[in-house]
Image (cartoon, rainbow, N blue to C red):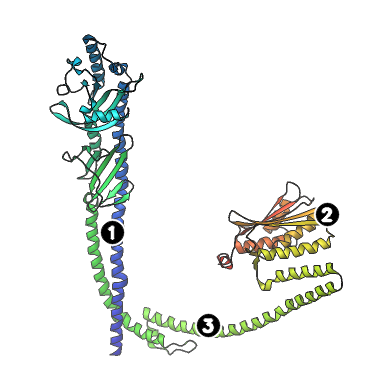
Amino acid sequence: MFRSVQSQRLTKKALLFVIVFIFIPMLLIFWFASNRASLSIKMQVGKALSELNKQNLATMDRVMDSVDQKLVTILSSDLMQKWKDDSTLNVEQRVQKYIATEKLLGNYSTSVKYSLFVLTKRPTNYYFAPSTDVSGSGVFFVQDLKERTWLQKAAEANGRGLVENIDKFGFNVNSQKTIAYLRAVTDLSNSGDTISILVATEIESLLTSEMNSIKLPDHTREFLTDARGTVLVGSAPDELTFSIPDNGKELLPNVWITNSHMYVYHDSPLYANRLIYEIPLSSLLGSYNDVQEIIQITAICYFIVILFFLFYLGKSVLRPMVRLASLTRSYVPGKEMERYAEEDRKDEIGISYRYFYLMTERLNQLVKEKYIMEIKQKESELILMHSQITPHLLYNTLDSVYWYGIRGGVPEVADMVRDLSTMLRIGLSRGKEIITIREELNHVEAYLQLQEKRYNQSFHFHIHVEEGIEGYLLPKVIIQPLVENSILHGIGKMDGEGEVWIGIQVSEGKLLISVEDNGFRPLDLEKIHSLLSGTADPDKGFGIRNVHKRIQLRFGNGYGLTYSAREEGGTKVLIRLPVIRSEDEIAAYTE
């Protein structure tokens, strides 16, 4: 009975596991993947339509450019300036000028009509000219530009092109609305006043043709609007104004999306127009929604199969696993386990039992080995504590010699003993490998002071450290071997003319340490390179090779020593190290 209850509880847990860790995550993954797929489709289609919209608008701009170029050509004609003063002309002259201008405008008028509205104080002088209610294009005369607001706007534009959606233009009875492009003609002589307004009309036919040349998804609506949202041309004739709704979000630059539609648009900076595509999302995602339903049905069927399989596992696997769980709880490390018959099974349950017993045997062995290791560790700690007595005794002895020298009247000997003690203390550093720049400089200064006395002040040294970096960390005793080489092979016997310069600074994220001397011996770079690469005699150049390898083993091949010859004579060696401000940063180079 107890086994049945235990097995049933485990089955419920397994069912809960399937629901929480398989079914729910599967639904979440499906929901997420579905949304991501839908978003991906929208983004891909949005990118393609945005580029198509941009190219379509560019084509329309080229139509407007063509119209604008013709207006500019007409503006450059001498006839345009001849309309600035007609007070001295007789009727015949006025008729001739009118006919010449009509002919000029007619030469350019094809699908787009070109007209000129002349501003005159005496429009009755041109009684022979037809009105805009009769003629489809040509020369017309107005006494005040305010008679038509679009003429007034063109005059106020100061010669710039202006696109206007003109209602009731009045060229003829059948065409009351049109898209016009207007430019003011100004007096170029002195005043700069507006003489007339040059107008290109019926541009909508060209724009509509270019707009309809693009194949778009079904039920897509297209609109070309001005800056105020007034529809210039569009696929919905009843729409007088159109703007993108606010209840949405930006999917991509120039792509706006709502719950039902995608809006793709681009603006023309030259003509203050906006081309908008309104595309139903159902046209974009129709086939994808069908696939989504199929995936949902498949997911439900898959879950049902998982449940049946779970019940099967509960009967054939979970019950034996309860026994194994009980056996696991009773195990105590170091204690031999009692053997059971399940170990002899040939299936996965038998393998689990056998490997469990094997694991317990290994754990028992590890417990014994750990006990032996702890004993050996304690012995090593005793040996280490004993070894620390020797440097401590040496420091005390050197300290006694130092004070004996002070009392004996030989301060130079005392100073040398003190410097030697400093070198030994920093060199040993209680077993530490990483020390501060300040400690490293104390070590190398003690060494240099000893060598100055040894060589009877035959050289001088200079140390410069960038402010604020004395507490940075570096491997110990890496400068002293380089200084030693400079003294032995460069300046040790220069009778007071020898110089050693030590510089430490941070540059481009690296700690740079330079050691320079003005020694007279030429630098053999090939030999130095062989020493650093390890191809030279291992008994030579041990100091610099040791420093170079220590740095590279700890920090990598991007760091180490670099030798070069100084232009003034002598040798320069540069140590490249990472910038380490605290011991926590060292861990990045020890993993």
Q: Residue furthest left?
A: 173
Query: Which residue is disc 3 drawn over?
Result: 366
Q: Residue at x 13, y 28 (%)?
A: 174
- What is the C-alpha distance between the residues marked 2 and 3? 67 Å
Which callout, 1 or 2, points at the residue further toward the start of the chain?
A: 1
**In this view, 27 is above or below 192:** below
SS category of the residue bearing label 2: loop
Q: Residues within 10 Å of mark 2 (few under 14, many from 20)?
A: some
Res 333 label: none
Instruction: State yes or no: discs 1 and 3 in contact (Cβ < 8 Å).
Output: no
Query: Which residue is disc 2 drawn over?
Result: 496
Q: Is residue 316 left or right of residue 381?
A: left
Report the quarter where the C terminus lies. bottom right
Please tell me whether mark 2 or mark 3 is closer to you in this view.
Answer: 2
SS category of the residue bearing label 3: helix
Q: Residues within 10 Å of mark 3 (few under 14, many from 20)?
A: some
Which callout, 1 or 3, points at the residue further toward the start of the chain?
A: 1
SS category of the residue bearing label 1: helix
Q: Residue at x 38, y 81 (%)?
A: 350
- Name which residue type carries label 3: Leu
Instruction: State yes or no: discs 2 and 3 in contact (Cβ < 8 Å).
Output: no
All told, the count of numbered labels is 3
Q: Residue at x 80, y 55 (%)?
A: 491
**In this view, 260 is above or below 5:** above
